[in-house]
Image: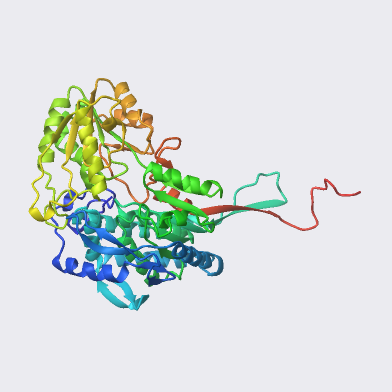
Amino acid sequence: MLRALPCVSALPRCRATSRWFSEMAAPAEAISKADDVISRTSRLFIDNQYVEAEGGRLPVLSPVDGKPFASIAHASARDVDRAVQSARRCFDHDCWPQQDVQARVEILKRIAAALRTPEVYTCHSGRADAALLTQVCDALCVIESRDCGKPFSESQGDLGVCADTFDYYAEVAPETMKTTYPSVGAGATHFYARIAVEPLGVVGCITPWNFPLMQAVLKVAPALAAGCAVVLKPSPLASLTCCALGELVAAAGAPPGALNVITGGPPEVLEGGGSTGQYLIDHSMLDKVSFTGSGSAGQKMLEASASKLRPTCLELGGKSAFIVFEDAADDLDHLVDWVMVGIFQCTGQVCSATSRLLIHESLEAKLVERLLEGIRSIKVGDPLQKGTLMGPVVSEGQQQKVLGMIQQAEADGGKIHSVPLELPKELQQGYYVPPTVLSNLAESSAAWKQEIFGPVLAIRSFRTEEEAIRLANDTPYGLANAVWSADRARTQRVAAQLKSGVVWENCSQVLFPSTPFGGRQGKASGFGFEQGIAGLKEFVSEKTVITGDRTGYSWGVYKQS
């Protein structure tokens, strides 16, 4: 999910390929400043202050080389309660939810500006202080790349999307939060109605490790725009940039408690049992939970909310298809690039990755040959170095899972196409997986059916349009799909029949702050939305008010004569 950088300013700001920016390396100054940012911000952020956690610290291993390079706070049950209580005070007793939406808009604009410029507000003595400035934007990108392994250029793109998202919700919040006055019909002469749009309350936001800061912002920005108070809990595998988000929000003018950031497990367990995340979703003072992650974790979110009848938004996994018709033969260069964007960006760790390629049988041999040429050109290595197109997966556990799926595909009769990695000695303990193409897979094979969440593309051929649609829809997931054809009527016809929340025609992974993103309801990709007006409405509650236009009037149903 990337935004155009100055060198490609004519391009739209969107979730798209970072390969346009792949020649960028991390500046040496940013690398040196990253440690300063980490040491200042890698604590809990509660009541607009950085504080230590009762649960101690958790080590952070960089997937780049497998070595520890930082630590994060391990929030205890009491730490979680402090954060939720802070948010509750902000919502119930502060003016934050009641203030004019324009005041919140100005805060969002200041956050966006801070993310776009080299100068952003930082903290002094643990408290946000607007008088102190430091150049940290590129340092945040360095931290993101070291923490989750994505190339520096991708991290830059993510940061740009974060800024665009804050600006987008600053733009649309005033109109969306307006009270409206619906017609009540010509016969209702003594009544009128209004629909007030109010902030929902205190929200627990639990975010994943593949787009750490960006996924947090996709929840935090609309929640703050609506007037909610947020407790953000990022994944322990990649929390560091989210820790820094707290001071940005506070320095922009948000009151204590508007955004609290806590870190910890699962899978890490606190002394005496339980995890930070479980204590958060079990807390009775949350009005809503918004979660992005795996299906199994999503089920736990629902279990925790069920007894409370608490609304829960889930953005879960996918096994998206990319359908390629025979008339793509005249545009293979662009097609191959989009196919590779769909599966190798972020090392394939993208919920909407188009990880199943369905090719018309007349084009299969030629397209596979071009794809294999393409993967041989991908430079895999240190995400901070110039020219790196793909970094490691996020953890050793993820590496072993992905490699295990590839091995199982081969044992099941699949054919493996990949290029051996050539890593320098200092990176050989990192969590790298070669870009891989799988062919000759049975429809029932795990590699075809299950989300791998790595740089692995599974391919099959088809004969007819009907067969392609059937294969694409033959999955429990319903997040996204793509279709490529020179025939616009065909792409539109196929898109209408694909059972997913998003469909790309002649592209892949392109999204904008204004376009809602979420799974098709009734499928295993979750429910609810991020981005767009729909993303803001996840954090509001509508109230209908019916008013009798004068006293001294009633229906007279029980009036005594």
In the drawing, does residue 460 fall left or right of residue 179? left
Of the pair 313 and 73, the residue shown nearer to us: 73
Q: Position of residue 522 (x, y in %)?
A: 45, 35
Q: Position of residue 219 (x, y in %)?
A: 40, 55
Residue 433 visible in this rendered orientation of the protein:
yes
Position of residue 47 relative to residue 371, above or below, is below
Q: Residue at x 25, y 74 (%)?
A: 134
Q: Residue at x 48, y 60 (%)?
A: 228
In the drawing, does residue 458 fall left or right of residue 44? left
Q: Position of residue 316 (x, y in %)?
A: 38, 43
Q: Residue at x 21, y 40 (%)?
A: 403
Of the pair 95 and 142, the residue shown nearer to us: 142
In the drawing, does residue 450 fall left or right of residue 283? left
Q: Residue furthest top?
A: 463
Q: Residue at x 30, y 25 (%)?
A: 444
In the drawing, does residue 45 fall left or right of residue 98? left
Residue 342 visible in this rendered orientation of the protein:
no
Q: Position of residue 263 (x, y in %)?
A: 37, 61
